């Protein structure tokens, strides 16, 4: 009986401990962020590292999703005689759900792993200790700059993914039945308002917060040499992807209640 | 009343006994005082009541077997770890009670050379040495550049400014680490195994470099090492850790004269 309780309680206990540590880590970052210097140069470097360098992958993922969605939806809609609804269905689907979630997952794969591995490697080679020993707060220089860069870049990357998705949706549609891009866009956005577009795009800022926080947290608590670095990179991707999906579910409900 | 007299009167009235700072900002008292320092990891007691004092301008070598807490001692002194109990005073200031901002201010007066140099591997040699200067001084870019060149020339690395740490040998990394540790002209230098993993010729070069830097900068230094030859060359005093305590402390000659079985064994094994 006791072993059953222990085997159930132990993972719950570990999760609660992890969550508590994550909360403390967040508090350290917020405290460090409130003080000068604001590390503007490092923030710019991270914006480039996280934003510009993720752009090709995010754009490609958006384009592929748009292309496939258009092809798949076309035959389904044609069956119900609603072929003309394709642009509107595609735009609605991409800006509401597919664009933000695909961007969140692609970035959590690329950036989450990158941050986890980079900070993990810095931790095990004592580079973070060296930074602290020279009087520089690593919570600000390393964590705050990366988290803010993730928060700022995710909505912009989502815009890129949305644009590429719609563009390649049109390409797929026009390959089957030629239609001008202008007409496709007009039909696509006929029932969409700016409000439809705003809330889903900006909810990716929350995805950015999750990816940045978890990547930095997992990286900065790395232990045990190269194996530990690998574990941090993997756990950063797995946990940030998981929490992005969970946050998506919660935020969709929130947006439906407050923005529709 | 003269401002200094006012300050002394205020101190007397408060009953506190702070270290009196000289005009250079350096304390006239001991640079580092450790009292009753305890540190455990789980059930393993690593430091079990360490008492040590290092005067300004003095070099203390800390010897001991692997796992006796020598590196932990250095990390406690610079505040990277917290002691379970005990006192650490840097120029009279109790660092275990300091908030992070105050601790960071104090850390600017200390230089730390890590065992594996811990150079930032995404930065060049020049950027590594400039890192503390960029964060803590108001130097212009050109002043920083001149200072970096001067520091790297001091450790014989002036020709490797644009190299990445991965392109350097272990000895070269230690030299750059030393240059970075000296960037802010520290009063206290902490060296963790400066000659570990280096060949005898490079070890001798590093020892000579440390001696030269000590003469030039007049710092208090604490050197953690396994290398008895290195300790003999660069240290004024040595302390041997055993069982979490300072087993013996004094000059190297005093160590050699000791009747203690462990001390004799330790010195014999390395000779």
Image (cartoon, coloured by chain):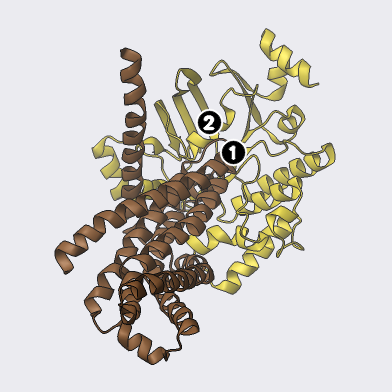
B178 with respect to A94 (left or right) = right
Q: Position of residue A34 (x, y in %)?
A: 31, 59
Instruction: Kindly identify which residue carries mark 1.
Output: A227
User: Mark 1, residues whose alpha carbon is within 10 Å: few (<14), some, or many (≥20)?
Assistant: few
Residue B26 visible at all: no
Task: Give the label on residue B73, or none.
Answer: 2
Q: Which of A220 and B52 is in front in this view?
A: A220
Q: Which of the two residues, A113 or A94, is positioned nearer the viewer here?
A: A94
Q: Chain B is drawn in which colour?
A: yellow
Please state, as top left, top right, bottom left or bottom right, where the N terminus of chain A lies in the image.
top left
Relative to A68, say whether A134 is above or below. Answer: above
Residues indicated by labels 1 and 2 sit on the same polypeptide chain: no
Please state if A249 lies on the left or on the right of B232 as rendered. Answer: left
Dot 1 lies on which element?
Answer: helix
Provide the secondary structure element on which disc 2 rests: helix
Percent from the top left, x then y, of residue B204?
Answer: 80, 40
Question: What's the residue at 74%, 27% (across, down)?
Answer: B228
Q: Position of residue A147 (x, y in %)?
A: 40, 59
- The answer to whether residue B103 is above or below residue A188 is above
Provide residue B149's location: percent of width, then percent of height: 68, 64
Q: Which residue lies furthest to the right in this view?
A: B201
Q: Which chain is brown?
A: A
Quadrant in which the C terminus of chain A is drawn: bottom left
Residue depicted at x 33% and y 65%? A97
Q: Is the residue marked by circle 2 packed among few (<14), some (14-19), or many (20+) residues within 10 Å? A: many
Residue at horizontal 67 percent and vertical 36 percent from the top: B193
Q: In the image, which is nearer the foreground, mark 1 or mark 2?
A: 1
Chain of the residue that carries numbered disc 1 in the rendered image: A
Residue A6 versus residue A144 in the image, above or below:
above
């Amino acid at each position: 009986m006791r072993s059953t309780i222990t085997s159930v309680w132990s993972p719950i206990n570990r999760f609660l401990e992890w969550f508590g540590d994550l909360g403390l880590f967040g508090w350290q970052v917020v405290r460090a962020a409130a003080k000068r210097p604001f590390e503007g140069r490092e923030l710019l470097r991270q914006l480039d590292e996280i934003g510009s360098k993720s752009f090709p992958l995010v754009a490609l993922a958006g384009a592929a999703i748009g292309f496939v969605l258009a092809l798949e939806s076309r035959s389904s809609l044609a069956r119900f005689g609603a072929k003309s609804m394709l642009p509107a269905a595609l735009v609605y689907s991409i800006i509401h759900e597919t664009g933000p979630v695909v961007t969140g997952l692609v970035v959590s794969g690329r950036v989450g792993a990158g941050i986890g591995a980079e900070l993990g490697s810095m931790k095990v080679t004592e580079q973070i200790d060296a930074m602290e020993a020279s009087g520089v707060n690593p919570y600000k220089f390393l964590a705050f700059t990366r988290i803010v860069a993730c928060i700022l870049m995710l909505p912009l990357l989502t815009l890129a993914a949305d644009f590429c998705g719609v563009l390649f949706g049109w390409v797929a549609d026009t390959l089957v039945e030629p239609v001008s891009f202008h007409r496709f866009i007009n039909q696509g956005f006929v029932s969409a308002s700016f409000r439809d577009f705003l809330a889903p795009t900006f909810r990716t800022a929350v995805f950015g917060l999750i990816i940045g926080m978890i990547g930095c947290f997992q990286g900065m608590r790395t232990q045990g040499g190269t194996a530990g670095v690998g574990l941090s990179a993997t756990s950063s991707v797995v946990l940030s992807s998981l929490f992005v999906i969970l946050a998506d579910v919660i935020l969709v409900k929130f947006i439906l209640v407050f923005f529709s | 009343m003269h401002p200094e007299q006012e300050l002394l009167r205020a101190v007397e009235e408060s009953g506190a006994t702070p270290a009196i700072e000289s005009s250079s900002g350096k304390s006239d008292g001991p640079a580092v005082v450790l009292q009753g320092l305890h540190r455990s990891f789980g059930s393993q007691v690593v430091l079990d009541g360490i008492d040590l004092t290092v005067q300004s301008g003095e070099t203390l070598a800390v010897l001991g077997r692997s796992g006796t807490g020598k590196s932990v001692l250095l990390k406690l002194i610079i505040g990277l770890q917290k002691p379970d109990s005990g006192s650490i005073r840097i120029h009279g200031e109790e660092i275990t009670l300091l908030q992070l901002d105050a601790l960071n201010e104090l850390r600017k007066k200390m230089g730390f050379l890590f065992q594996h140099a811990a150079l930032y591997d995404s930065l060049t040699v020049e950027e590594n040495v400039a890192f503390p200067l960029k964060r803590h001084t108001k130097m212009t870019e050109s002043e920083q550049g001149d200072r970096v060149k001067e520091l790297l020339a001091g450790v014989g690395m002036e020709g490797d400014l644009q190299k990445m740490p991965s392109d350097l040998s272990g000895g070269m990394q230690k030299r750059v680490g030393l240059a970075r540790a000296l960037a802010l002209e520290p009063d206290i230098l902490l060296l963790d195994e400066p000659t570990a993993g280096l060949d005898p010729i490079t070890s001798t070069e590093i020892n000579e470099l440390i001696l030269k830097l000590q003469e030039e900068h007049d710092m208090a230094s604490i050197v953690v090492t396994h290398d008895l030859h290195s300790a003999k060359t660069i240290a004024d005093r040595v302390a041997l850790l055993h069982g979490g305590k300072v087993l013996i402390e004094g000059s190297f000659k005093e160590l050699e004269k000791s009747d203690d079985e462990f001390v004799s064994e330790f010195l014999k094994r390395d000779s």
